[in-house]
């Protein structure tokens, strides 16, 4: 299945023909606009963005203990409650 991407841009008023041809053009434009909007509008049950990556390499190496030590001068403070700033 081939997927196509396109953009609809509205700029000001467009002169339209009157009569049956103008009405048909207007209906087609509204229908196409709705189809484009429904196609590209995010769905509640699907993610808006999906990113997939592959791990190319993994290695295990020792890490010095100092990496996990609390820095000098660190003062422990209680965490703020949810909603407080």
Image: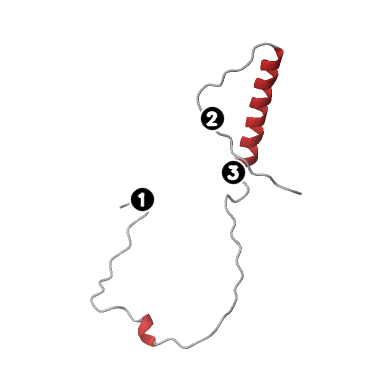
Residue 44's disc is none
- Marks 2 and 3, Cα distance to the nearest angstrom? 21 Å
> Is residue 12 left or right of 21 when viewed as pictured?
left
Q: Disc 2 or disc 1, which is closer to the eye? A: 2
N-terminal label among 1 and 3? 3
Residue 83 shows which numbered tag? 1
Judged from the image, the secondary structure of the residue bearing numbered disc 1 is loop
- Looking at the image, is mark 1 or mark 3 nearer the viewer? 3
Q: Determine which of the numbered discs, if any, sits on residue 10 in the image.
A: 2
Query: Gap between marks 1 and 3, in whole Å?
Result: 28 Å
- Looking at marks 2 and 1 on the same chain, the residue that comes earlier in the sequence is marked by 2
Q: Residue furthest right?
A: 1
**Vertical comparison of 10 with 5: above or below:** above
Residue on which disc 3 sits: 42
Residue under the point 38% across and 87% down: 65
Dot 3 falls on a residue whose secondary structure is loop
x 68%, y 25%: residue: 28
């Amino acid at each position: 299945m081939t997927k196509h991407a396109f953009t609809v841009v509205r700029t000001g008023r467009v002169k339209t023909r009157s009569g049956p041809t103008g009405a048909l053009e207007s209906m087609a434009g509204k229908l196409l606009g709705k189809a484009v909007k429904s196609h590209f509008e995010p769905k509640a049950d699907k993610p808006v963005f999906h990113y997939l990556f592959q791990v190319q390499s993994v290695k295990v190496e020792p890490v010095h203990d100092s990496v996990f030590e609390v820095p000098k001068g660190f003062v422990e403070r209680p965490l703020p409650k949810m909603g407080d700033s």
